[in-house]
Amino acid sequence: MGSEGTKLTTQYDLNLPPEAQPYAANPTVYLNNDAFYAARPLTSVAPGRWEAINAVHHNRSNNYHALTAPLKTQNWHGLTSLVNWTWSKQMDTFFGESGVQVIGGQWHPEWSYGPSDGNHTHRFVAALLYELPGKNLTNPYLRWVLGGWQVNTITTFESGSPVTVWNGHTSSYDYMGDVADRTCSGNLSRGDRTFTRQFNTDCYVEPAASTDPFWVNQGVLNFAVHRGNERRNNLVGPGINNWDMSLNKAFRLVGEGRELQFRAESFNTFNHTQWSGINTFDDRLSNPASTFGWVTGARNGRHMQLALKFVF
């Protein structure tokens, strides 16, 4: 299955400064926000009045391609299930309802074309309901105690979201996003990942700082000699390995329509460690205590709850 999105909305600044040319023979850059503001076309017409004038344009597109494989069973030996595996790829230049491309900005939106923030290569979800044997027991007391128990689970395995590695020291000063030079694939196998090394940080090098007197004499000691080659969302973040389970039974009581419902539920039943974010901001050149490549967040651990409900 697949889809193509065209004429999607995007934010468009009608008062955007001209494109910077940091690596031209006569470079043009915006060394700070004041310089960026002063370069806005309407500033000279009405100083202090206009900043960004954001309009809505319909010039964005995306695409999605996938292979899906579902499996359903209905009360097969007490098992009812809905299992689905999806192998997919989603591409775009911006993910969301409004905003600006993180690499290239409004000047070169094509620089941001890559895997979408919502891209998950593999997603497997299994919803299972199994009724334990017991309802057909001949002894009415055993049937009342042992019959009608149900075990349910929703199991999810999902590839992580893609992320981008950013420069934390050198910069092009062009407001088009500063990225590192990538020398190899930074993705590590599951067994090689640690809390402080979720990806291969050795694969990323910041563009060197220029020693050109033109920049040094202005006090700009971190002007990048070139733009990094890292593409948007080249790195895959932590995925999901989660099991939610429940055990429940309805005890029928004396009287029409009366029953006692018991549920025991657990979320992330096996208390599997699931990271939710990693630090992709490379500031190692200027920060001796850099946490580049470290885990920055985690999903919830195991949570359990019991419920008892009387229906009448």
Image (spheres, rainbow, N blue to C red):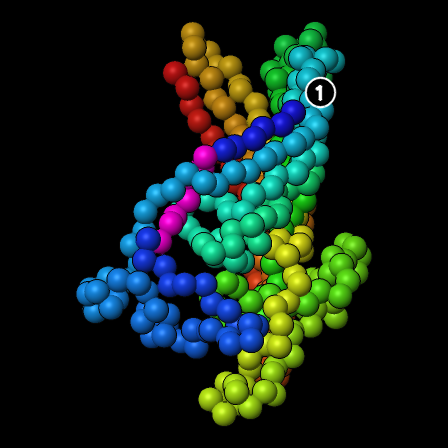
- Magenta segment: 7-13
- Please give the name of the residue rendered at 19% of the width and 65% of the height, measured from the top-left corner: 46
- Image position of 169 (left or right of 123): left
Type of secondary structure dominating the magenta stretch:
strand
Q: Position of residue 143 (x, y in %)?
A: 65, 14
Name the quarter where the C terminus is drawn.
Answer: top left
Can you identify the residue that label 1 sits on? 71
Q: Is residue 49 something one can see in this rendering?
A: yes
Q: Position of residue 136 (x, y in %)?
A: 69, 9
The quarter of the displayed image where residue 283 is located: bottom right
Residue 275 vertical placement versus 264 (above, below): below
Residue 134 vertical placement versus 67 (above, below): above
The quarter of the displayed image where residue 71 is located: top right
Q: Find out whether residue 231 is within the magenta segment.
A: no
Given residues 152 and 44, the one toward you in this image is 44
Q: Given the image, on which type of amino acid does mark 1 rest? A: Leu
Name the quarter where the N terminus is drawn.
Answer: top right
Q: Find out whether residue 10 is within the magenta segment.
A: yes
